[in-house]
Amino acid sequence: MKTDLEYIQENYIELNDLCTLCEMTKAELNQLIEKKLIPESSYKINSTHKISSPLGDEIEVSEIKKFFPKSTISLIQNNRKEEDTEEFKQIFKSEFIASFKKHKSNEFAYGGIIDNAGNVSQVKLEEAFEQEWQYYLQGIYGICTLNSTPEEIAHKEITVKRLINFIENNGNKELTEELKKELKILNDDFNAVSNLFAPYQRKASSRGKYLDEMLDINSLSHLKKKYE
């Protein structure tokens, strides 16, 4: 079992390493964050070190390390020279909306997103995007999704809501073999876009609350995604 530190250090990149790899200063990286061209860090590790010497003295030193998804590297490479910050958001929005609209199960997401004519409500979808955009900028999707892409964000919302619907309809009864096949498909769809979450987060995450628990109670624990 991975520790939380091992999971974060292996799957994310620390701020100083990110700056070195991208040949930029911390100030330049912070500027990209302020301009909303890359998200905030997804994890912060606060550490306190006690330093002592044979002279009988000691001091405590605290430090904060920030960790970003590894996908931030390519995002920096693509956006570091971008001047029009609104253009990046609009491209991101267009890809999110297109991915959502073409998904065959989009009716499960964002309650009331389908209008009376059976079409996706553009107004409600744009409102949903604005909320997702804020989550993205905060670094939340660096925790929840594999690569923080607009396609993954749209896909994950739909898959989570499909899982919740599946549980509401079938959670209190023993699953038939046919329903187990459906659960396996949902598991594959979820894993295609979703991260594991750090061990301390997993039980409270959408993976832990919905998918892991449903697999456990149906003797399908072997399908649970494991820490490598």
Image: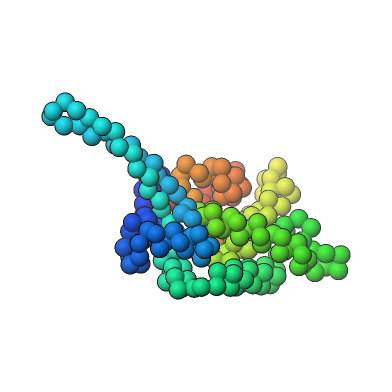
Depth check, front residue: 54 or 159: 54
Depth check, front residue: 205 or 211: 205
Residue 226 seen from this side? no
Name which residue lies at 13% across and 28% down: 55
Position above or below: 5 against 228: above
Image quadrant occupied by the N terminus? top left
Q: Position of residue 119 (x, y in %)?
A: 80, 69
**Residue 69, image quadrant:** bottom left
Name which residue lies at 50% across and 44% down: 201
Q: Position of residue 151 (x, y in %)?
A: 59, 67
**Residue 117, image quadrant:** bottom right
Q: Position of residue 5 (x, y in %)?
A: 37, 45
Depth check, front residue: 94 or 165: 94
Position above or below: 139 against 75: above
Q: Is residue 118 left or right of residue 92?
A: right
Q: Position of residue 75 (x, y in %)?
A: 46, 68
Residue 85 seen from this side? yes
Q: Is residue 28 left or right of residue 49?
A: right
Name which residue lies at 59% across and 69% down: 86
Q: Residue furthest right?
A: 116
Depth check, front residue: 174 or 141: 141
Name which residue lies at 59% across and 49% down: 206
- Structure colour scheme: rainbow
Count of numbered circles in the view: 0
Q: Is residue 128 left or right of residue 8?
A: right
Q: Residue furthest top?
A: 56
Image quadrant occupied by the C terminus? bottom left
